[in-house]
Image: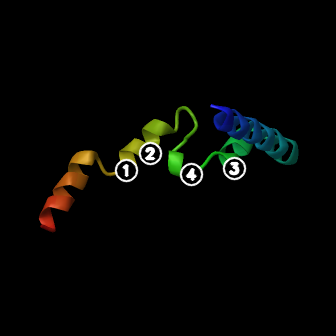
Amino acid sequence: VKELMVFLDIAVFEIILAYLEKRDWKEAFFSVLPQRKGAVPLGEANDLSKCAPSEKEDEDNDSDGN
């Protein structure tokens, strides 16, 4: 639990520093948040789901190779 709190403190500090540099909260958040987490701004999540392949398509592609 202590490690998580330290990580969160560092992340908050980095977001604030990024905001001071960029003067844009959205840019600050998304420059600090790990891309692998798939974070997207509210309202843009629906746009990305239209472009991303569905899980069903992924399963179909996996089964073709075997």
Could you give the CA–CA distance between mark 2 and mark 4, rounded to whole angstroms? 14 Å
The x and y percentages for residue 61 are: 20, 60
Closest to the observer, 45 or 61 = 61
Mark 4 touches mark 1? (CB < 8 Å): no
SS state under label 1: loop
Q: Please identify the residue farthest to the right as the structure is shown.
A: 20
Q: In the image, what residue occupies the spot 66% across and 38% down?
A: 3
Q: Which residue is mark 4?
A: 35
Tell how many labels: 4
Could you give the CA–CA distance between mark 4 and mark 1, rounded to whole angstroms? 15 Å
Q: Amino acid at mark 3?
A: Ser
Could you give the CA–CA distance between mark 1 and mark 2, rounded to whole angstroms? 6 Å
Q: Amino acid at mark 4?
A: Gln
Left or right of residue 13, residue 38 in this image: left
Earlier sequence position, callout 4 versus callout 1 = 4
SS state under label 4: helix
Q: In the image, what residue occupies the spot 72% across and 37% down?
A: 6
Q: For residue 39, which quarter of the picture?
A: top right
Q: Please identify the residue farthest to the bottom as the structure is shown.
A: 65
Mark 1 touches mark 2? (CB < 8 Å): yes
In the picture, the quarter occupied by the C terminus is bottom left
Could you give the CA–CA distance between mark 3 and mark 2, rounded to whole angstroms? 18 Å
Q: Which residue is mark 3?
A: 31
The x and y percentages for residue 59 are: 20, 53
Q: Which residue is mark 2?
A: 48
Could you give the CA–CA distance between mark 1 and mark 3, rounded to whole angstroms? 22 Å
Q: In the image, what residue occupies the spot 68% across and 33% down?
A: 2
In the picture shown, does residue 13 fall above or below 53?
above
Q: Which residue is mark 1?
A: 52
Q: Amino acid at mark 1?
A: Ala
